[in-house]
Image: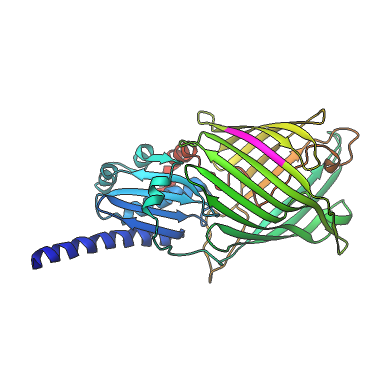
Amino acid sequence: MRRKLMIMCVSFSAVINLSAQVDMQLAELGMENIRMAQSDKGIAVAFEDRAFRSSYEGVGHAIKSALEGMTEDKELRMVVMDANGLPQLEICLDKELVNAYRRQEVNLCEVFGQMKLSCETDYTLSLLEGTKTEHKSAWRPDIVVYPHLFLENSSLDKLYRYAIALAPAIEMPLWKGAELAAQVILPIVGNQKGELKQVRPGIVAVRQGFYLKKNWTLTVTAGQFTNHRLGGMADLRWRNDNGRWEAGVKTGLTVFSMFVDQEWSLTRKPRLDARLYGRVYVPGWNTELTGEAVRFVYGDYGVKGSMIRHFGECTVGLYALYAEGQVDGGFNFALPLPGRKYKRWKGVRLKPADYFTYEYRAITKGVSSVNDKPGILYTTITGENRTRGFYQPEYIRYFLMKDYEEFGK
């Protein structure tokens, strides 16, 4: 009996040590909100990556670090969460693959090629129910400095309007699934008067995310948004298991809000906007195709189609829009800025924006401003683009295998 009890204690200690090793490796890497569960079959872990600029680079380092903490040949299951605590990606390495890596029979590139990636996270999350969250990010702010560029022109040979500014923002997790963003825009140079020449608020908003099971998520945001909109928006979306197909609906109720000359102008009449969209990811081209049916801010209806190509961390996109009998279009891009990873200092992380994001909309002759045109929309979060927090499984695998040598450093 005593011998049996000793064997059980040793076995239990080994499992606890295995769990602690993996937790320690991920924490040292800078991952936060880590939850872990262990069983005879293996280890399950969920974490948020706020340290790495690149989604696939963060995933690659997390897999490598977790494997270094695996002192036994057991299954390793990982769920990557976004900043709102919503599950984005499941990673599964079976016992045989963990064993082969530990024995140096396969390298990281082969691990990336053989592991299972999916957007279906329910099973792994069920293993983590009731577990304690370690290395919490709540109430630990990031201070992020965004570049802000405004350009408009009415002809191809003349620059009409421009303004360059810096837009520092405080981005702080509050509780599970919630985050606060508060931004101020500081003008630097431009040829405009009025608002674009003055210090003014940018996005000031609180966002709450909910995971509804079976790849459904709901995000609710309230606050001051872009394009002078104040109010709230709800975003309900679904993805299939391999992440190739996505569909959703966004609806908002906002009023006009502008701060200029130390006065705050606010309308009382709310405006309802809504978007029904579908998106497909084409892995052979690393391209996203999106179609939307839209009721825009000022009650006009239309459709919008866009194509975005991923070049690693860079994205370049084109879009066309039809509203109120008018055909419009433009382009957008996101380019990574210097700095691949940032650490906290006394709970605070100070850093430049991860990406420089810009969208240009053509101004047709005879129209003096974008705001005079149909098809007005807005964004609700700072630094929004199609690269930041992008966890499409085939995108992740492709660029992990392409750049796997980076993870050996």
Q: Position of residue 292 (x, y in %)?
A: 67, 33
Magenta region, mostly helix, strand or loop? strand
In this rendered view, identify the residue nearer to me: 318 or 224: 224
Q: Position of residue 389 (x, y in %)?
A: 55, 48
Residue drawn where x is 66% and y is 43% of the image: 250
In this rendered view, identify the residue nearer to me: 175 or 82: 175
Quadrant in which the N terminus is drawn: bottom left
Residue drawn where x is 17% and y is 62% of the image: 8
Depicted 69 relative to depicted 297: above or below: below
| Residue 320 visible | no
**Relative to 252, 315 lies left or right:** left
Depicted 8 relative to depicted 407: above or below: below
**Relative to 248, 325 lies left or right:** right
| Residue 47 visible | yes
Magenta residues, as a range? Answer: 274-279
Q: Quadrant of residue 314?
A: top right
In this rendered view, identify the residue nearer to me: 90 or 216: 216
**Relative to 204, 244 lies left or right:** left
Residue drawn where x is 43% and y is 49% of the image: 79
Q: Position of residue 202 (x, y in %)?
A: 74, 57
User: Is residue 8 in the magenta section?
Assistant: no
Furthest residue in direction right, as rendered: 366
Residue drawn where x is 86% and y is 38% of the image: 158
